[in-house]
Image (cartoon, coloured by chain):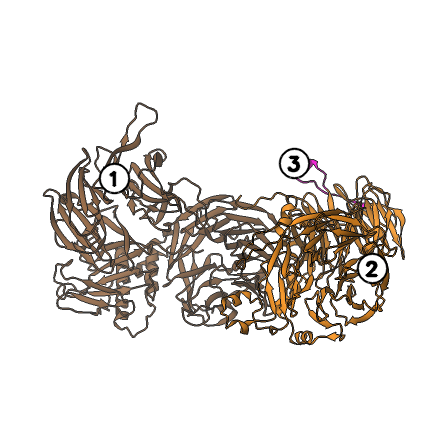
Chain colours: A orange, B brown
Amino acid sequence: MGELKVHRVRFFDYMPTAIRAMAFNAHTERLALARMDGSVEIFNFTDHYFQEKVIPGKDSRSIESLCWVGGRLFSAGLNGEIAEYDLENLRPKYSLEAYGGPIWTVISNTQGTQLAIGCEDGTVKLFEVLEEHIQFERNLDRQKGRIISLSWHPSGTHIAAGMMDMIRVFDVPTGHAVQRLLVDRGIGGSKSRETVVWSVAFLSDHTVVSGDSAGKVQVWDGHTGTLVKTHLVTKWDVLALSVSKDESSVVAGTSEGTVIQFQFIAPTLHQQDKEWVRTRTFKNHTHDVRALAEIETAIVSGGMDTHLVVRPLLEKFDEKSHASGLRKIHFPHRNLVSCAKKAGLLLFQFPGQLELWRLGDSDGHGKPGDRLPLKWKPEKLLLLKRKGEDHICCSALSSCGGWLAYSTVSSVRIYRLQTDNNISITKVSKLPKVLRSAHQLCFSSDSSKMFAASSQSSVLVIALTQSECKYVHTLKPKSGSRQPIHLMTTSVDGKWLAAANSDCEIHVYNLQKLKLHCIVPVYGSCPSAMGIHPTTNNLTMVHADQQLFEYSIVEKQYTDWSRKLQKQGLHNVWLDRDTPVTHVTFNPKNPNQVVLHDMHMFCIIDQSLPLPDQKTQFYNQMTLRSLSEQERPSHLHAFKICKTFQDLLCVSLLDDQSLVVVERPLLAITSQLPAPVRQKKFAT
Amino acid sequence: MISYVESGITVSVKVYSSSSEECVHDLQGHTDLVSGIARNPSNHLQVYSCSADGTVRLWDFTDGILIKTFIIGYPIYSIYVSEKHGGVVFVVVPMANDKSSELFQLVAVHLPRSGDQEVEARELSAVLCDVSPSPGAASFGREGEYVAAAKGLQLEVFFFKKQKFFLKPGIKKGSKNAFTCVSCHPKEDCIATGHADGKIRLWRNFNQKKEYTYSTLHWHHGAVNTLQFTPEGTNLLSGGIESVLVQWRYTQENQKDFLPRLGAAITHIAVSPDGSLFCTSHSDNKITIIQSCVKVSAIIQGLVKSEGVRTDLMIDPRSKALVLNGKPGHLQFYSLHRDKQLYNLDIVQQEYINEEGLDQFEVVKAAFDAHGDWLATVEERRQKGSELEINLKLWAYDEQTQSFVLNTTVTAPHEDQITAMCFSPSPETTMLVTISFDGHFKAWLLADHSDTKEGASWSCDFVGGYHLLKPGCCCFSADGSLLAVGFQEVVTVWSPSSWELLTTLSQPPGAIRDLCFGRLSCSKYLLGTSTKNQLCCWNILTCSLEWSTPMDVSLLQADPLSENIAAFCSQSGLFVFKPGEPRPLYSQRALCTGKVQHAIFAPRDQMLESCEEHAQWLNRSQLYFLTQHMVLTVFVFGGVFQLMVDNSVAVTPFYLLLGKHRLQQQQQQQEALTNPMAERIQLPQGSIAIKEVCLLYTPAHVLPSASFLCSMFVRSLLISSQNSIVMMALHPRGLFHQSCSDTSVQMETRRGSHIKCNFTTWFVLIQTTRPEFNPEHPVQELELCRPPHTGRVRIPILVYYRLHTIYSSPHTI
């Protein structure tokens, strides 16, 4: 691999926020996930759980519940508003005051014609879902006490509502409450505290399943209003319930971080009368499980400990595959770090601010693995707080370090930076009117142009000069895709720009002619990272399913190396990795080397070396080290993988041949979380 | 109503009463290890037992009668029965027809209906291949519809109706969650499995489609050894190394009851058919009977097998019980005559924490004074990186509670390990001497503080040493007037009254290993063994060496009731001699396999009137010894049966009856031995003989009618026609060397050493109950037969001694 000086950066205090709500769309296989800061993420479960879209949060918005109606996504929160999201422009489409105080939950009926919300003032409000809007229809009978949770019977005639100390069943056509199911309080000291029914599920055989703050999962008969079975599962709260599609299984998430499965099983085989039996327990969280979804083959859970867990149900798989492995998604599948390669600056993007750091330097020499003495320490040059309520959705730093730009859903700001001796920052005041918001920002390598990904996959080209910035052109794709662009990259010679959107299309534009050059053949999986080679102008793309392609922009075809790689197939170890590659850079000194990384490793692909076949040892760095100089060449292969650094957010190669590795140890994230509920541990 | 607990122990099945803890019957008949027992589902008074000898036997356990013997022909490792499958028992046999095979299969055996006592059951049909041979690893499900068997990481379910396998995929490999045991719910389709990581999984919905699911219960921190559903299926019982019986409520698994402190790891659980009594067997040779998980109602406790006997064997002078290490931190009092533990004395008095690699206090030395009023114990704990912790505790016998009460605790009595400890036998003073590697010996005296309220307590009286040498052993003379302490090569003799060094004796080279004063008429002699294989005898009166002989003596033990001293050699030879006489009373080579590590003379209840001179040394006491394989063996030498009717020494008719059949047995075995090519045949008359033995133990009200007995009895008095005794080996010089063809045990006796009379030949018969010679199961019966004297006696006089194994494998239910 050769020797590299490594800047091991651990001062990016990235802190994801807790997961609050989740909704799975079985039709499109998209999971919508709401975090505490009001941001919404869309994961594509058909494409290796790739995080397709991120709708940035807003200070005043809090989301308590998410709900899909067809392809439309609605949310409701404690600010009392219902919002619908524009998934093409990654922003709320509209929001509507419900006039019922804070909203705890929102659900839709199976037909997708109505929404029901549960409000703090004790009303269940029905909204009609119209083509472009929703409209208030009526209230159901108002109850005393807040409505915490709702569940619609699949036929649409009844709604079960979880409240304080009770569950109400409403008849939807008349709007009257027909059943009142009283929920016991906890025993002991919690007797005086009201029991909160955090979650209810109404099954098609009129069974109501409830989870409450006394730690019980209870099964009720919805017709008669009688309790069928009580499962005391925890000393703390049962916060979330989710029912499988065939209603044979219910999962419950608790404050202890466990997910408990209940199954509808006949106690004796081949008999009809079935009962709900507690079966498996999954413990993948340390904190409250606030959101749950049971999908066809897996249980998806998330909560206070900020990571999303996809726990496959192993009995649904016949053989081991990438889908049968446990997935934990900790980091976003996009870049939060911009690196100025010439100036040695790093820009860290937080939802509320940007941080600009200058890397330290050292002129020492040492053995591999040594810590070098620092000539100067890394230094935080700048902390830039955003203006307005909207959170930052993207940011960029030019490679010379002279320009900085960020965008929220409402505005784009560009700054001129001076970092040489005395640091100064000046906002570029006059921006072109067309530049209102951007999904992605990117500077050309000579910092003369800035590219902003706009709506409908178009790219705005902005010319930057010392005094002003000027709108030049809008690059539009021919395909007419309306999906947002999530990746953009330019070539070093300034001639090419590649942009990838959520439809998996990659457009290559000629920046000299300002027109579309070609479309890379569409591959079925979304590109997760790409880069244009500085000398050959080949576009290297890595997709969410871990496939790797190299496309010659000049020749408009895949390169020979890429064809060879596809013909031979990637190594299974490579394909089995569970985090996508999020960054591709190149070694300017050695044109054969491509540097890419995911969360757990970084890899230098040397295109001059033979490709590994399935039999070769894939992680061979340790073996190579133990071999003598003469034996090594026969064991070399193109993928050189380093796992020394873990929990990587960014790996980039600076122009002075030093490697920047931005780590965010998961332990550091865990240590900043609030303390979990106290549990008696064995032998303590 | 009496409920019975059956426990399979080595070669017999014992029936205990669950209310009185007494052994009601000993069902003997199997010739090899009994591996399992099961109730006959169609008759609740009958029980099946299976054994590695390849037979399944059906017993009437209330009367203790063998009803039938089914010969399977393969060694059987466990047995299962099911109510639905009448006339069929399921046994686990090796896949290949040899004992070394690692693969086992579960087969169904159709028991033929015939009136014969002994039936060959050859109709076997394989049910499951590759199962685990351990008895808890398979279980029959609801109404016998399926059988579940677990091995390694796989659980297999076989449905009888569909004749279909249902294979569960192995659970995650690499982790320590291999299956250990299985139990099926009797009413619902639920299989409970125990795992090596302490989890219990309840499997449900296991139909042919892959829709099975499981829930996990976790309380045990060690492996789950055994699982059992109660007959109604309302509760699930589990046990493991924690020695806690856990009762889980079925379907409400978070409610569980515990019965803690059962003493040792639970190995098996059985539930009575009405569910009122549970029975757990433990790794320390104990059966506990529990009333519905609430109360321990009875304990059947054998000799506890401890990790290592670091205290010597001792005899409690009061109860005449054998005292040795029992449970960790305890001393056990074990009645030799009743094969029963009398009680446990908690010495360490600390909670024992069951964890590997944890250093805890161990009882390393114990000693009784002459009357059993005082008990001294030494416990030590050696932790890595810290100093040795030693406590000396002195316990006074309390007449009221009939047990020992702690009187004095001395922390750190010595700076180093205590190597020996003994009480002074003198009646005037109560004195204890401790010897330590720190170069000193200390004398402790009972100081009477009658003026204070505290009562008597012990304190140090004297600290002695000799040239900073390390002392290794000590011994008081019989009257307590002399104390001999071995300081490496030097024996120092002290006067305990004045603490004066009287003399030193030395016989280099070699450090003194063991010291022993002679008793009674030989009390002037001091015997010592050295590491350089010398056995020396000093005369204390002359302070000179009386005699010495090169002999590799590893253990020297004096009989307190006679002058005799037993010396065990390294090659487990035994010599019994009187210090004053140069010639040994008795000698025996190759007594058993393994080195004899501890031995003790236990006084007999009644003195025997033995006429044989070579056996007279055992008249007053019995010799018990413990080998390195932790087998406690008793040396029985003396049942001398003279089968002449005119020889009228207290020959009761039953005595005669018994002896006669034993004799016949011997003869047949002799015949079998003379023809080594012939197969080892099953004794055709063995069953009758045993029946008659049983007859003696059977209560009178269950005996057959007197007329039946009478005819049998009269028949046995008739002189047998078969009088063919075969000489095995003849040697004119009387020194002979005989190796048996199938055991390779060698025996050698010296002529005249124990028989003075004119017998010229001996022959040796060695019968082992296990065909292979296994160090864990040493010779269980070793018999010496003497041919008839040519002139006078017509019917052979049979001399036999028997090594009776008391340590047995843990009880199995």
Tag in front: 3 or 2: 2
Q: Residue B706 versus residue B11: which sits nearer the camera?
A: B11
Residue type at mark 1: give it. Phe
Residue under circle 1? Answer: B441
Crowdedness near tag 1: few (<14), some (14–19) or many (≥20) residues, C-alpha within 10 Å: many
Q: Residue at x 76, y 43 (%)?
A: A166
Q: Secondary structure at mark 1?
A: strand
Q: Quadrant of residue A495?
A: bottom right
Q: Residue B765 versus residue A489: which sits nearer the camera?
A: A489
Q: Label 1 lies in what chain?
A: B
The x, y position of residue B412, in whole percent, is 34, 38
Residue under circle 3? Answer: A189
Per the rendering, the mark at residue B237 is none
Tag in front: 3 or 1: 1
**Discs 3, 2: same chain:** yes
The x, y position of residue B566, in whole percent, is 21, 51
Crowdedness near tag 2: few (<14), some (14–19) or many (≥20) residues, C-alpha within 10 Å: some
Q: Residue furthest top?
A: B451
Residue under circle 2? Answer: A463
Label 3 and label 1: CA atoms lie apart by 62 Å
The x, y position of residue B380, in whole percent, is 36, 43
Q: Residue at x 64, y 75 (%)?
A: A568
